[in-house]
Amino acid sequence: MARVKNTRFTKRIVYGNIASPLSQKKCAKTKDSTHKWTVFVRGVNGEDISHFIKKVEFGLHETFSTPKRVVEGPPFEISETGWGEFELSIILYFVPESGEKPITLYHDLRLHPHADDGLMFSSNVSKTVSSFQYEELIFIDPFKEMYQILADNDRTSILPARSTASQPFSVQAEQEEIKAIEEAYRQVQEYLTNYKQRMDNATKEMEQIKAELESLMHT
Ligand code: SLL
């Protein structure tokens, strides 16, 4: 099978979970469970990705009755109830036309607000928490058949201009991150200049003391 040379397609996906606490009544019904959660993989614009993803295998914690959950079609997601956070594996199987091997992603299932997301001290305890990750899947010189599939569904390649509450990844977010990195770089440079100045001063002072000492010794 021939490959289409010098071509590259980028598919942008989001994976992660949302979770919310169960009401007291529901907690009682579901034994130990305290939260309901949904883990998912989808396009960066929430679009269908089944033209290039054949199935997704979610690997849950072994405390679940059937930890291996295979989703054969869209939406690629699993909803469960549980009591604890754990690391999920998410194996993406590509359509056979791609000739690509499956890839494994990992996601820390998040049930509780964490200190760094600003939700920790929120008074609204029933708040939904979410934890999303962004990934770019790049197909280089795809097989002809796969090229056609990718070209026909190019929409998955578009990073949205602005972020929303349910989709934090965007051109805007990317630019803000670049700005923050540049600012951090500038600060590091400033510190370095400062320290170098202090070191130069200290060296000078030391030389002065040394000279003074020497002149004292010779008197
Ligand atoms: C913890 N290391 O101790 C983690 C493990 C496992 C969570 C968390 C099972 C639910 C069910 C469940 O929520 N397991 O069996 O229905 O926090």
Image (cartoon, helix red, strand yellow):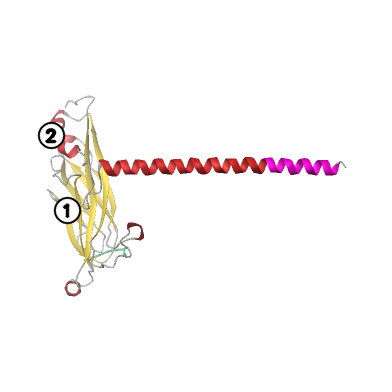
Say which mark, if any, is on residue 219: none
Q: CA distance from mark 1 to mark 2?
A: 23 Å
116 part of magenta stretch:
no
Residue stretch rendered in magenta on the structure: 204-217
- Give the crowd class for mark 1: few <14, some 14-19, many >=20 residues within 10 Å: many
Residue bearing the label numbered 1: 77
Q: Measured along the vertical axis of the image, is residue 66 above or below residue 183?
A: below
Label located before the other in sequence (1 or 2):
1
Q: Residue at x 29, y 59 (%)?
A: 86
Q: Measured along the vertical axis of the image, is residue 65 above or below residue 95?
A: below
Q: Quadrant of residue 213?
A: top right
Q: How many marks?
A: 2
Residue 217, position in %: x, y?
Answer: 85, 43
Q: Residue at x 55, y 43 (%)?
A: 194
Chief SS of the magenta region: helix
Residue type of the residue flagged with mark 2: Ile
> Which of 126 and 8 lies nearest the eye of the viewer?
126
Residue bearing the label numbered 2: 149
> Which of 64 and 27 lies nearest the eye of the viewer?
27
Q: Residue at x 13, y 50 (%)?
A: 75
Q: Quadrant of the C terminus?
A: top right
The residue lying furthest to the right in this view is 219
**Mark 1 element type:** strand
**Mark 2 element type:** helix
Residue type of the residue flagged with mark 1: Glu
Residue 177, position in %: x, y?
Answer: 34, 44
Q: Please state if 191 lies on the left or on the right of 178 as rendered.
A: right
205 part of magenta stretch:
yes
> Which of 12 and 146 lies nearest the eye of the viewer?
12
Q: Quadrant of residue 138?
A: top left
